Image (tube, rainbow, N blue to C red):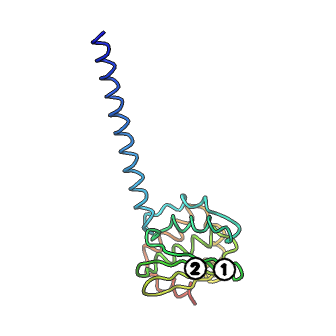
Amino acid sequence: MQKTISLVVGIALVLLLGVVYVLSNNQKQVEQEDVEQQSVDTHNFKKVLAYENDYMGNNSNITNLFNNLPLSNHRDLVELDPDTLTFVVNYNTSGEEKVAIYNATVAFILIKNLEVIDMRFTDQSYVITRENVEEWFGDDFSSLNEPAVFKENVQQPIMEITTTDWIDQYTK
């Protein structure tokens, strides 16, 4: 009887250690994915497709979208102006052209009636319009919601080339 109890306790301890190990590894994986979502070059566009919506007036949807884009860990207050279809997002960090381009492109692809994004950083602001973004991509804009097409036409070029012409077009 004593051996049986010891055996059961031993098995329970091994199972408990296994569960703790698995949970610990899962937590590390989730933390790594969160870090990857903060950078333009490692952001996974597929993870934000769930926020696709016809209307920018869905406050929780657009806010959650920006909670899952690069620099979300520096995102501050947001404002919606339904009259002008404008979304204002404040960041408590310095401006980054690549992030502004990336986040605006994602937002215009996924939020169908969003017309203007005003990204306010501590040192500069970018006012980006749907019209300018669509003009930059031309006929390719409508296909950018496909993850492979998005990576090829948005994510990789942002990381490989200078973004001066790109941001000039977006903010003209």
- Looking at the picture, which amino acid does disc 2 mark? Val
Do the residues under discs 2 and 1 have CB atoms within 8 angstroms? yes
Which circle marks residue 88 in the picture? 2
Which circle marks residue 81 in the picture? 1
Q: Is mark 1 on a helix, strand or loop?
A: strand
Residue 163 coordinates in the image, percent (x, y): 46, 81
Sequence order check, earlier mark of 2 and 1? 1
- Quadrant housing residue 107: bottom right
Q: Is residue 82 left or right of residue 17?
A: right
Q: In which quarter of the image is the N terminus?
A: top left
- Quadrant housing residue 144: bottom right
Residue 157 coordinates in the image, percent (x, y): 48, 73
Residue 93 coordinates in the image, percent (x, y): 41, 78
Q: Nearer the viewer, residue 109 or 62?
A: 62
Which residue is depicted at the point 63% across and 72% down? 140
Q: In this view, does 133 lie to the left or right of 155?
A: right
Q: Is the residue 66 above or below the residue 169 in the image?
A: above
Q: Nearer the viewer, residue 4 or 146?
A: 4
Q: In this view, does 73 lie to the left or right of 56?
A: left
- Mark pair 2, 1: CA separation: 8 Å
Which residue is depicted at the point 30% across and 23% down? 10
Residue 16 coordinates in the image, percent (x, y): 35, 32
- Quadrant housing residue 22: top left
Q: Is the residue 8 above or below the residue 49 in the image?
A: above
| Disc 2 residue crowd, few under 14, some 14–19, many 20+, Cα 10 Å | some
- Looking at the picture, which amino acid does disc 1 mark? Asp
